[in-house]
Image: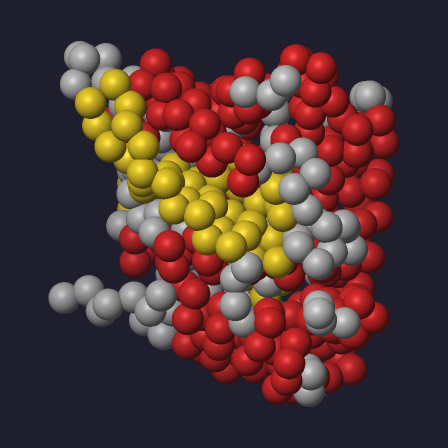
């Protein structure tokens, strides 16, 4: 029988407490940051293609906005519920604080299996959800972006719906209400690959620090969507070899290497990796036991646990996903001497380039890819160094160090501003 998973929000609270105790975070600020600020739950009706009506439940949780507008993705998935969204919103606050960008943390989504709906139905569901959220989102207030099962097209529908509900004279100056838009609709070049690019920039830095040759490295990836497929493709030019991949349809392996670009083309046509002709199908346990240098979890939470962490035979876990490792899994990785680039650092490339998109929209500018990549590199490598140096200073693991970087930043701002009234 599958052991009941601990709620990811519990994981966040455990991670938070460990860091707060170690850095001796002010107890009042601990109280503030252990709670979310606003939690919006909307139930809304949508007419299906066959004329029937279905009710949906959507969420937007705003954890903190002391550093800037709430910011975070929208997920369309059957596992979306309030505790998960709270956890994801909280991680967004830490992520922006570590990356030093002027955003707070939020997350949202719809409890839905999007595979069961047609494109027209998904469009109506997205638009009606946006309408239900109303002014709980806004370009200077709370800015959604893509996450699991949402993409640039869905952002374009949100944009269009939001603008349609604004007074005409306000529409043009509100296109930064969402990021991760299609480029033609005001998106930033480089946003599509940004999270995977950030993952690869942090892996590069770790390799330099550890005299590790990426040219002869092997890696495997869980999740082959936006984050996983871009991370896989962007590691390829270093000469590293992708030897196994898993997605919702199962896992595949090829010790001779899987071409990440070819696999991406295959997934664009077939939606999933199952049936890819140049690799063997393997089971989940064999996938986790893959002997490689780097594992890049890029799917969902709670994948590396007390049960699964002992199976990993790698030097580095680079967390493309949010929350892939729970606190028990973390302990095992530490005992095994496996290095971890934690999610709130490793996958921050997405929110960093979302910030660039937001800035470009506000300034009516279009940057080129060189400018975006160069600025992303600087931001994420600075964040990486802050976390690495804090881990040394506090003699602690990198996840706790990443929290300390975030919490120290937020603590200063709260102390400066004080608590109203
Ligand atoms: P996506 O929808 O593009 O891809 C998700 C992938 O995970 C798919 O390949 C899917 O088949 C796979 N998957 C789903 N369930 C699985 C399972 N049980 N086992 C194995 N694979 C499974 O989503 P994404 O945007 O790439 O997001 C992936 C992760 O990265 C999430 O944790 C998300 O929160 C995080 N993240 C995304 C961004 C972003 O910019 N999109 C930024 C930061 C973090």
Q: x, y (%) of residue 415?
A: 78, 74
In the image, residue 353 above or below residue 380:
above
* Apparent side of residue 336 relative to residue 194 in the rendered image (left or right): left
Residue displayed at 55% across by 35% down: 135
Q: Is 359 left or right of 22, judged from the image as shown?
A: right
Is 88 or 274 nearer to us in this picture?
Answer: 88
Residue 315 occupies which quadrant of the picture?
A: bottom right
Task: Tell me residue 5's x, y (percent).
Answer: 29, 66
Asked if one can make out residue 419 in the rendered structure from this viewpoint, the answer is yes
In the picture, measured across the screen, residue 206 lies left or right of residue 340, that is: right
Determine the residue positioned at 44% across, 48% down. Answer: 40
Q: Quadrant of residue 388?
A: bottom right
Quadrant of the image occupied by residue 186: top right
Q: Is residue 109 left or right of residue 226?
A: left
Indicate whether 256 appears above or below 15: above
Is residue 198 visible from the viewing direction of this image? no
């Amino acid at each position: 029988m599958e052991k009941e998973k601990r709620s990811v929000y519990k994981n966040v609270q455990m991670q938070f407490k460990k860091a707060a105790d170690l850095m001796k975070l002010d107890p009042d600020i601990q109280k503030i940051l252990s709670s979310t600020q606003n939690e919006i739950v909307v139930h809304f009706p949508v007419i299906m293609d066959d004329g029937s009506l279905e009710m949906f439940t959507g969420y937007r949780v705003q954890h903190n906005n002391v550093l800037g507008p709430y910011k975070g993705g929208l997920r369309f998935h059957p596992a979306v519920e309030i505790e998960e969204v709270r956890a994801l919103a909280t991680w967004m606050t830490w992520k922006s604080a570590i990356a030093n960008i002027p955003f707070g943390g939020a997350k949202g989504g719809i409890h839905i299996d999007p595979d069961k709906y047609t494109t027209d139905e998904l469009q109506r569901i997205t638009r009606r959800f946006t309408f239900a959220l109303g002014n709980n989102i806004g370009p200077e207030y709370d800015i959604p972006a893509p996450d699991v099962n949402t993409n640039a097209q869905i952002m374009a529908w949100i944009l269009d719906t939001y603008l349609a509900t604004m007074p005409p004279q306000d529409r043009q100056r509100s296109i930064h209400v969402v990021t991760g838009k299609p480029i033609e609709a005001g998106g930033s070049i480089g946003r599509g690959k940004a999270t995977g690019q950030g993952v690869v920039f942090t892996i590069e830095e770790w390799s330099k620090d550890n005299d590790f040759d990426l040219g002869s490295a092997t890696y495997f990836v869980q999740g082959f969507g936006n984050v996983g497929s871009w991370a896989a493709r962007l590691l390829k030019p270093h000469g590293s070899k992708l030897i196994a991949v898993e997605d919702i349809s199962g896992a595949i392996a090829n010790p001779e290497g899987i071409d990440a670009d070819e696999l991406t083309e295959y997934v664009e046509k077939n939606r999933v990796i199952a049936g890819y002709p140049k690799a063997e199908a393997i089971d989940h346990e064999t996938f986790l036991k893959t002997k490689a240098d780097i594992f890049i979890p890029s799917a969902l939470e709670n994948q590396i646990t007390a049960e699964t962490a002992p199976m990993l035979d790698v030097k580095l876990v680079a967390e493309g996903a949010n929350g892939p490792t729970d606190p028990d899994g973390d302990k095992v990785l530490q005992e095994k001497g496996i290095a971890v680039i934690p999610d709130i650092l490793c996958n921050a490339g997405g929110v960093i380039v979302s910030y660039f998109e937001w800035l470009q929209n506000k300034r009516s500018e279009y940057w080129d890819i060189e400018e975006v990549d160069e600025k992303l590199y600087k931001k994420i490598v600075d964040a990486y160094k802050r976390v690495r140096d804090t881990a040394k200073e506090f003699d602690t693991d990198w996840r706790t160090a990443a929290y300390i970087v975030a919490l120290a930043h937020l603590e200063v701002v709260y102390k400066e501003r004080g608590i109203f009234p």
